[in-house]
Amino acid sequence: MADLTLRAFQNTKVHAVRAGHARLNELFTTYYHAAREVVAENLWPTRCAACGTLGDLLCKTCSSQLDFIDLWRACPICGAPYGMHQCCECNSYSLKGIERSTVPFDACVSAVRFNRVAAQIVRTRKDGGERRLVTLMAYHIACSIPPEWIKPESVVCFIPGSSRAIQKRGFDHAQELANEVARLLGIPVLNILAIQKARDQRGLGRHLRAQNVKGRFSVCRENMPAYIILVDDVYTTGSTVMAASDALKDAGAPRVYAATFARV
């Protein structure tokens, strides 16, 4: 009996010591990151992503210039800002120009129009390395997503960057954005799409963009979720989002929705 009591005491002491070490490690990590942020802020102070003013990632003036899309006026299918009654982008005539008769996704929304401020936010994050902007972009995307898209079976997926782009930037900007959107929505994120080589979309016209991404994506999993929210940063002509949606639908996805930060 005495031996059992001694062993119980020793086990309790060991657990207490381990718990104390874990708490110390947690505190050390917290203070380390805080100290690092202070040093970084003094050496490289935060500037507005749009105008360069010292202070915040996005100053109040530039924040007020974000052109938010009114979802009550937007097209309920493709998300064009003023297409509620008659859309100029997903009608049969416009789609014929990119060799389509319908859009492959079930619905699409975008948070803001692609004006000067939105463009600077996207460029500063992707090419300027200001990864903290992902929180701002993801927040506005999450706010624009209709509640009916969020089901127990819903997941977020993303359009993966090319290996060359990831190597150049040091991170996959699309995956980071999807991770943050999924966190805000409280649903999981899945790596579903794989990408083949293609030319950079920047500088290409509407028709060439569609041709460039045709058949570019494949699916890297067998069982498809019932509801997929495809997240991207910018909807320009829709070619990339549509090509990715094609791959998801062809793989058997019942519902594919698209959500982007900005809409050209």
Image (cartoon, helix red, strand yellow):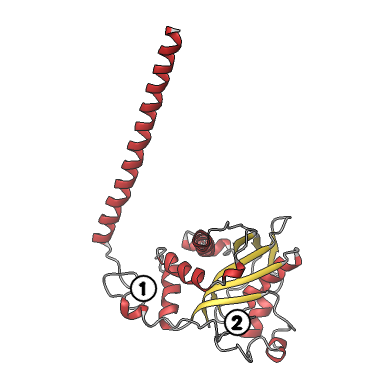
Q: Which mark is residue 237?
A: 2
Residue 104 x/y as whole percent = 70, 75
Residue 45 x/y as whole percent = 27, 65
Q: How far separated are the C-alphas under marks 1 and 2?
A: 25 Å
Image quadrant where residue 63 sits: bottom left
Q: Which mark is residue 131?
A: none
Q: Amino acid at mark 1?
A: Ala
Dot 1: what SS?
loop
The crowding category of the residue bearing disc 2, from other C-alpha atoms within 10 Å (few below 14, some 14 to 19, many at least 20), is some
Residue at left offset 55%, top offset 87%: 73
Q: Is residue 60 left or right of 168 when viewed as pictured? A: left
Earlier in the chain: of badge 1 and badge 2, it is 1
Whether residues under marks 1 and 2 lie with C-beta atoms below 8 angstroms apart, the answer is no
Closest to the observer, 86 or 207: 86
Does residue 27 appear in the picture of this structure? yes
Residue found at the very far left of the displayed protein? 42
Image quadrant where residue 43 sits: bottom left
Residue 179 x/y as whole percent = 52, 59
Position above or below: 18 against 164: above
Dot 2: what SS?
loop
Position above or below: 34 against 140: above
Q: Is residue 114 left or right of 153 when viewed as pictured? A: left
Residue 2 x/y as whole percent = 42, 7
Q: Amino acid at mark 2?
A: Thr
Does residue 127 appear in the picture of this structure? no
Position above or below: 172 against 201: above
Please give the residue where the numbered disc 1 appears in the rendered image: 49
Q: Quadrant of the N terminus?
A: top left
